[in-house]
Image (cartoon, helix red, strand yellow):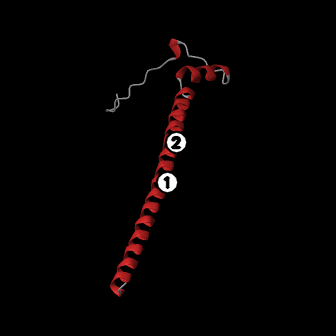
Amino acid sequence: MSRLHLVLLALVVVCALGVVNSQHHGRQLFVALQQEQAQQRKLDVEWGQLQLEQSTWAMHGRIEKLAKERLQMQVPSADRVQVVNDMVGPAQ
């Protein structure tokens, strides 16, 4: 074989190794991407559960029940309720 053939053969081998290395790296990145997407789906599910839990804890009926039971609060009678006008204007 001539010297040119050996140089070309070495160049082909180096290029082939570069392609194999690039494919391997691409596959590793794809696997990492899939793992991150799975983690994102898990976090989305957890976020939805937390929102549902928050809305449950903040329900008006639950708040009213806790106010009555734990704090012994009562709804005031109608004669003790005073309506305040929130309009800003000159004092009357």
Q: Residue at x 54, y 13 (%)?
A: 77
Q: Give the residue number, with chain letter if any, for mark 2.
A: 43
- Dividing the picture into quadrants, the one containing residue 13 is bottom left
- Dividing the picture into quadrants, the one containing residue 57 is top right
Name the kind of residue labelled 2 in the image.
Leu
Q: How far across and down, in percent of the image, does residue 84 sit? A: 42, 24
Q: In this image, 90 relative to 55: left or right?
A: left
Quadrant into which the N terminus falls: bottom left
Q: How far across and down, in percent of the image, does residue 53 sit? A: 56, 30
Name the kind of residue labelled 1 in the image.
Ala
> Residue furthest toward the bottom?
3
Viewer-side residue, 90 vs 65: 65
**Image position of 16 with respect to 72: above or below:** below
Label 2 neighbour load within 10 Å: few <14, some 14-19, many 20+:
few
Residue 32: which numbered mark, if any? Answer: 1
Element type at mark 1: helix
